[in-house]
Every structure is written in C-alpha cells, then in structure tokens.
Amino acid sequence: MTTIVVGYVPKPEGRAALRRAAEEAKLRDAKLVVVNSHRGGRSFDSDEAAVSDAALTEVREQLDSTGVPYEVRQLVRGLDPAEDLVAVAEQVHAEFIVIGLRRRSPVGKLILGSNAQRVLLDAPCPVLAVKAEEGED
C-alpha cells in the first residue's frame, strides 16, 4: 500500500495540509501517516502536551470519518519538525509528503519558513505544499 506522510500542527496551515493529505490518500487508496513533532525539553510542558493530545484526538475523529487508513505519530525527541518529517518519510517509503504553509506578508514572502524549506530540500520524495484558506482559524 502506498503511504503519504503529512506534517500536522493545530493551526490553519496544519489543518489545510491534513485535509489535502486525506483527499490524496482517498484518491490513491493510500495509508496516511500524520506526524506531529515537538522539540521537547523545557518548552514542551504538561499543559502543552495536553493541548497537543486534544488536537490529535480531533485529527483522529476527522480521519475516522473519511475511511482512510491512518497512523498518528506524536514525536517529542529533540529534532526539528523538518527532521522528523523527513525521517518518517524515509522510514515508511512515502510516495510524498504534504506540508502546510502559512500566509506571509510581502516581505515575509522573500523567505520561506525554515522547516518548510528544509523539508523541500531534504525530502526523499516529492513534497506537496498547501496554503490555508483565507479566514480559516
């Protein structure tokens, strides 16, 4: 079975990436691997872990309604999200990776986000980058 890896954060760009990845998985009869990555350490305390768990429960509920086979991986191991996404894509031999991009100001458009750029440059497979829709929360 083909596998698609999606980077998920509980923000508009993460939700947009998840929606598109689920659509692609359904079209391709593929399995979806959802990766939620945190660096860990002092910046990831129990409150933040609870918020993350709640967000991933919503992800599971959303994917259950699609009928797409999936796996959710919450990684807290000190790596950048880009490193985690690339590592998981290599591990599962992903057909492609889906990432979300946030909207940027005209000046911000000169520089792509560092995680997105690293995924695009280091991925072992094609990368599909999607934007959140206007006004999405």
Image (spheres, rainbow, N blue to C red):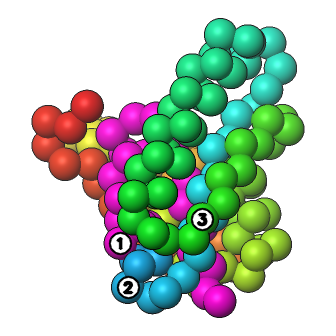
Please name whichever residue, 18 or 77, is drawn nearer the observer in this view of the structure. 18
Residue 23 in percent (x, y) is at: 35, 72
From the viewer's perspective, tell me whether residue 70 is left or right of residue 104. Answer: right
Q: Residues within 10 Å of mark 2 (few under 14, many from 20)?
A: few
The residue to which callout 1 is attached is 23
The residue to which callout 3 is attached is 70
Asked if residue 121 shows in the view, the reply is: no
Q: What residue type is disc 1 on?
A: Glu
**Dots 2, 1 in contact, CB < 8 A:** yes
Label ID, residue 27: 2
Residue for point 48% across, 57% down? 64
Q: Gap between marks 3 and 2, in whole Å?
A: 14 Å
Residue 103 in percent (x, y) is at: 27, 43
Please name whichever residue, 136 or 123, is drawn nearer the observer in this view of the structure. 136
Q: What residue type is disc 3 on?
A: Tyr
Q: Residues within 10 Å of mark 3 (few under 14, many from 20)?
A: some
Q: Quadrant of the N terminus?
A: bottom right
